[in-house]
Image (cartoon, helix red, strand yellow):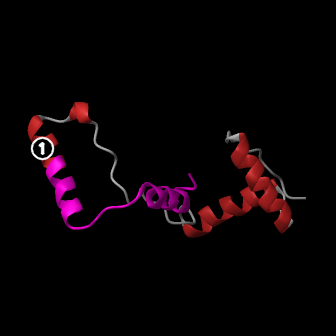
Amino acid sequence: MARTANVFARVEPEVKEQAEQVLDRLGIPMSNAVGMFLRQIVLQGGIPFEMKLPAYEEPVAYGSLTKEQFDAEIEKGTKDICAGRVYSADEVEAAMKREFGL
């Protein structure tokens, strides 16, 4: 048997459980899946999937804005409304669930 090394990682219990359920259905032990992930990092010279920031902008905190910045944000919102770029709360919630699993 090949020599092995231990890897210890802390993850949220829910994520671990969900991953175990998927891996069980695939017939792959967690340790094998971690090994596969690490091998792919070596083979690809980096993380083996695309990593990027979410496509949305962070919400603007009112308290951090000057009056001019606040007025500009209100103006942007008004232009969006006039251009018909409006979404219902249900549409936003559905998009968040699709995009981020929230």
Q: Residue at x 56, y 51 (%)?
A: 102
Q: Position of residue 51 (x, y in %)?
A: 48, 60
x, y (%) of residue 52? 44, 60
| Residue 84 placement, left or right of 96 | left
- Of 50 and 1, the residue lying toward us: 50
| Residue 4 spot, x, y in % from top left | 81, 51
Q: From the viewer's side, name the closer residue of 18 and 76.
A: 76
Say left or right for 65 vs 41.
left
Q: Which residues are magenta?
A: 74-102
Q: According to the image, label 1 marks what residue?
A: 71
Location of the N terminus (image quadrant) = bottom right
Q: Is residue 31 above or below residue 45?
A: above
Q: Residue furthest top?
A: 63
Residue found 18% across the figure and 55% down from its top: 78
Question: Residue farthest to the left?
Answer: 68
The foreground one among 58 and 73 is: 73
**Residue type, numbered disc 1:** Asp
* Element marked by disc 1: helix
Residue 58 drawn above or below residue 23: above
Q: Quadrant of residue 80?
A: bottom left
Q: Main secondary structure of the magenta part?
A: helix
- Residue 89 visible somewhere in the drawing: yes
Give the mark count. Answer: 1
45 on left or right of 87? right
Magenta run includes residue 80: yes
Residue drawn where x is 16% and y is 41% of the image: 70
Up the image or down, 51 lies above or below 73; here it is below
